[in-house]
Image: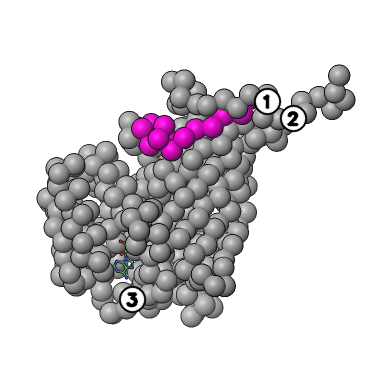
């Protein structure tokens, strides 16, 4: 019980690349376990900096029961200015704690894990809300690491996609992602410069920007039946939210921190516009008509990090890729000899 392992991001990344499809199943099971009540997932805690308002570090503590029976916490920084120096926006660690003793037993680099669980949940949400795994066009707004991971998970889930339309307010970032999608994943992909043209004919729209407030505000910006993966959470006006079906990961979590659904709640004073959570859609408990767009807004739950982190840790142990820290705990008996 006094083992303590470190799993590097290099190892996590390699395991993720080999197991994206399994991770979609892991995320699906975690959502169902959370919905069944076998979890504790308190609110995320945001550390912000008055003199650097775009930056934040978020703590996501959680416990996940079911087959996992593990507690832990992800501590994830978001410094959006990093990308100007070609440094990833997000960096993170995940600590896993043994549920029987409380002892931490692993520390994993977690930006890879966080991106993977986010992408797995996005692609799971797309399949559930669209009801199929083929699309004439998937439009992706925001061309960062999360967008790239989501497209890689579409590929791993064997989606048939006519073309990816890639948008970014920095044209060069959209070009880089489009080239990656063409060269590494073999899909047709090109840069689009204006949203209405990119949205036209899209079966799925992925929002993965760092926009702090809504810029998609045109009434009717989304078509009936169109699936919108609202990953960056703050791009859409509350009026568009209110004229759509809304599926979230967890209602209490998602209606915080000025997300677009939270703005809609503030505008109306109620939560009637929420159709349900993704677990209910998976369970067939939510019916969505084709008259309105379908927006999936996953706030990002700590239980997903635990599920994916536990999976990565297990695979790393099995393949001898953990670094054990001998003597990590300085006192292993209550009364030392
Ligand atoms: N919901 C979740 O569970 C979850 C989990 C992880 C990350 N995220 C979110 O995903 C987003 C993307 O993360 P990332 O690591 O890829 O960031 P990133 O900084 O690498 O990429 C974001 C991209 O969006 C572009 N962009 C910003 N504002 C834009 C706008 N208004 N229109 C078009 N493009 C715009 C930037 O130029 C950049 O290329 C972040 O907002 C992050 O908070 C959500």
Q: Which residue is mark 2?
A: 330
Residue drawn at the location 67% of the way across and 30% of the way down: 328
Q: Which mark is residue 295?
A: none
Residue drawn at x 27%, y 53% as measured from the top left: 130
Q: CA distance from mark 2 to mark 3?
A: 52 Å
Do callouts 2 and 1 mark residues in contact (Cβ within 8 Å)?
Answer: yes
Residue drawn at (33%, 76%) of the image: 215
Residue 195 highlighted magenta (yes or no):
no
Query: Is disc 1's CB within 8 Å of ligand 1?
Result: no
Q: Single out the mark in the foreground, 2 or 3.
A: 2
How many angstroms separate mark 3 from mark 1 (CA)? 52 Å
Say which residue appears at 54% left-offset and 58% top-offset.
57
Per the rendered image, the range of residues in magenta is 2-16
Residue 267, percent across and down? 48, 80
Query: In what element is the residue under mark 1?
Result: loop
Name the quarter showing ligand 1: bottom left
Residue 169: which quarter of the image? bottom left
Decide: marks 2, 3 in contact (CB < 8 A)? no
Q: Assess whether mark 1 and mark 3 are in contact (beta carbons under 8 angstroms).
A: no
Find residue 159 and report its image quarter.
top left
Residue at disc 2, CB closer than 8 Å to ligand 1: no
- Could you say where residue 31 lies in the image, as x and y percent from the top left? 48, 45
* Residue 96 visible to an observer of this rendering: yes
Q: Which residue is mark 3?
A: 215
**Inter-mark Cα distance, 2 to 1:** 6 Å
Label 1 sits on residue: 327
Q: Secondary structure at mark 2?
A: loop
């Amino acid at each position: 019980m006094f083992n303590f392992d470190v799993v590097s991001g290099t190892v996590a990344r390699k395991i993720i690349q080999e197991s994206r499809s399994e991770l979609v199943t892991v995320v699906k099971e975690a959502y169902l376990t959370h919905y069944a009540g076998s979890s504790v997932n308190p609110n995320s805690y945001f550390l912000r900096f008055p003199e650097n308002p775009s930056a934040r570090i978020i703590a996501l503590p959680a416990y996940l029961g079911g087959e996992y029976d593990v507690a832990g916490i992800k501590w994830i920084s978001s410094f959006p200015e990093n990308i100007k120096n070609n440094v990833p926006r997000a960096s993170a660690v995940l600590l896993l704690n043994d549920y029987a003793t409380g002892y931490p037993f692993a520390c994993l680099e977690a930006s890879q894990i966080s991106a993977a669980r986010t992408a797995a949940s996005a692609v799971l949400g797309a399949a559930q809300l669209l009801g199929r795994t083929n699309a004439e066009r998937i439009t992706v707004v925001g061309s960062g690491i999360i967008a790239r991971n989501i497209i890689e998970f579409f590929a791993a889930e064997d989606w048939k996609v006519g073309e990816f339309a890639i948008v970014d307010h920095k044209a060069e970032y959209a070009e880089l992602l489009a080239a990656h999608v063409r060269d590494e994943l073999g899909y047709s992909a090109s840069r689009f410069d204006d949203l209405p043209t990119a949205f036209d004919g899209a079966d799925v729209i992925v929002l993965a920007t760092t926009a702090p407030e809504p810029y998609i505000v045109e009434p009717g910006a989304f078509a009936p039946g169109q699936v919108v993966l609202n990953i960056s959470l703050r791009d859409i006006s509350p009026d568009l939210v209110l004229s759509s079906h809304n599926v979230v990961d967890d209602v209490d979590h998602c209606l915080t921190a000025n997300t677009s659904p939270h703005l809609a709640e503030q505008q109306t004073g109620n939560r009637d516009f929420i159709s349900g959570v993704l677990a209910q859609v998976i369970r067939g408990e939510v019916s969505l008509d084709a008259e309105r767009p379908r927006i999936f807004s996953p706030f990002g739950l700590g239980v997903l990090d635990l599920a994916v982190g536990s999976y990565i840790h297990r695979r790393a142990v099995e393949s001898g890729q953990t670094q054990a820290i001998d003597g990590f705990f300085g006192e292993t008996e209550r009364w030392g000899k």
